[in-house]
Amino acid sequence: MEILGFAASVIMGITLGLIGGGGSILTVPILVYVFNVDPVLATAYSLFVVGLTSAVGSVSHFKKGNVDLKTALVFGIPSIAGVYAVRKFILPAIPDPVFTVSNFEVSKGVFVMVLFAVLMLVASVSMIRKPKSETTKTKEKKYNFPIIFLEGLIVGGMTGLVGAGGGFLIIPALVLLAGLPMKQAVGTSLLIIALKSLLGFTGDLGSGMPIDYSFMLIFSAFAMVGILVGSYLTRYVSNEKLKPAFGWFVLVMGVYILGKELFF
């Protein structure tokens, strides 16, 4: 199972490198179902793994000129604030169990996984659906600072709750609101994910979580190998074909997690 888990972490990194998002949504399920990590602790591990992996991938994109630093700051600063606040104050305040109805008890771990599964379903629709023309020139778009700032705050809060990078929301926002070309949106997304995930992880330090740093670093190392491979493969693999295929996979995974947590 460990070999399977580390192989899956490489695949996660490859996907993140290829499409700039989506791959990180696999991290929590891998940690929970393959390595038997507690769901809440898995979200902390995921922030570190996704953050470090995305940082490595963003360096490759930066060298290619695919990172817009101004947009990364406008989106990234509120996003970092959102994820840090949720990890530091909101997540620890969620009771365990979250609620009980008759004999049906929803623990904090189940709540996190169900929320994560719902996020996966939303992400899958975003990936499967054909985007409206991404070829629109940036000069035809207005740089909407307030909306970009607000979405950064919302995506940051979501990342704090479930430990996913939120690239599937960031990339469309960068294309539609900041007017970035697709490749530049992917590179900028990786930098934003890296910043908010790593700084968000600091909100877990001192929380009393039993963090296994050696395991976390080994898992991250495999994921980083994957993102380097994925960044290299962007020269040969069509993003338009890969994204919907991965979206269907995420959809199946989301349905599986919902079924496992609620009915089995």
Image: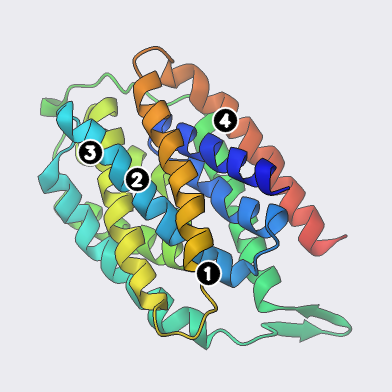
Decide: marks 1, 4 in contact (CB < 8 A)? no
Q: Mark 1 to mark 4: distance in Å?
A: 30 Å
Q: Residue at x 47, y 43 (%)?
A: 223
- Is 123 on the left-hand or right-hand side of 53? right
Q: Is residue 176 visible?
A: no
Residue identified by numbered label 3: 59
Q: Quadrant of the C terminus?
A: bottom right
- Is 197 on the left-hand or right-hand side of 26? left
Instruction: Tell me which colouring the rendered structure shows.
Output: rainbow
Residue identified by numbered label 1: 212
User: Looking at the image, is mark 3 or mark 1 nearer the viewer?
Assistant: 1
Q: Residue at x 57, y 33 (%)?
A: 247
Residue identified by numbered label 4: 246
User: Looking at the image, is mark 2 or mark 1 nearer the viewer?
Assistant: 1
* SS label for mark 2: helix
Mark toward the start of the polypeptide (3 vs 2)? 2
